[in-house]
């Protein structure tokens, strides 16, 4: 009779609370999966926003670097021009002094 009792027990339906518990766990897993998907999308949006911000900052820094490079080149040209003007004034002064010396030498003869 023990074999017959085992057969009867396997044919007994599960209590309703067990199936609702499994359904509740399944719903909980689905909700958790949806939450994880939303979190993933949020992180992707934030990463995209950070990338845009970094790209904008990079462009700003590159533009600033170009401005500073142009300013440096302009200053270098000014220094070169100023040096050329100084050299020209010194050369003119040297020519004037050489001329005066020659005149004095001619007068001395």
Image (cartoon, helix red, strand yellow):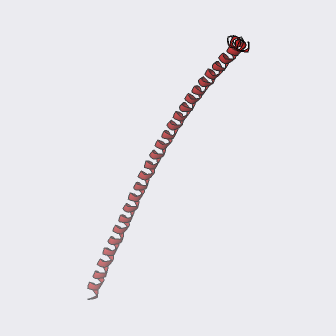
Residue 61 placement (x, y as % from top left): 48, 46
Residue 16 or residue 71, whichever sits in front: 16
Q: Quadrant of the C terminus?
A: bottom left
Residue 36 or residue 15, whichever sits in front: 15
Residue occupying image coordinates x 63% and y 23%: 29
Q: Quadrant of the N terminus?
A: top right
Residue 14 placement (x, y as % from top left): 69, 13
Residue 49 placement (x, y as % from top left): 53, 34
Q: How many marks?
A: 0
Task: Please determine whether, in this image, residue 79 is positioned above or below residue 34.
Answer: below
Residue occupying image coordinates x 45% and y 51%: 68
Dividing the picture into quadrants, the one containing residue 30 is: top right
State the residue lying farthest toward the bottom: 109
Residue 78 placement (x, y as % from top left): 40, 58
Dividing the picture into quadrants, the one containing residue 79 is: bottom left
Dividing the picture into quadrants, the one containing residue 17 is: top right
Residue 10 or residue 109, whichever sits in front: 10
Task: Please determine whether, in this image, residue 92 is positioned above or below residue 76.
Answer: below
Task: Please determine whether, in this image, residue 62 is positioned above or below residue 73.
Answer: above
Residue 28 or residue 78, whichever sits in front: 28
């Amino acid at each position: 009779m023990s074999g017959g009792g085992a057969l009867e027990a396997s044919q007994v339906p599960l209590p309703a609370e067990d199936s609702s518990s499994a359904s509740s766990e399944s719903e909980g897993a689905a909700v958790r999966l949806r939450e994880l998907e939303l979190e993933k999308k949020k992180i992707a949006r934030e990463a995209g926003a950070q990338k845009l911000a970094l790209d904008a900052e990079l462009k700003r820094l590159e533009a600033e670097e170009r401005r500073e490079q142009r300013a440096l080149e302009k200053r270098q040209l000014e220094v070169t021009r100023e040096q050329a003007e100084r050299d020209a004034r010194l050369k003119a002064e040297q020519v004037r002094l050489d001329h005066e010396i020659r005149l004095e030498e001619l007068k001395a003869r």
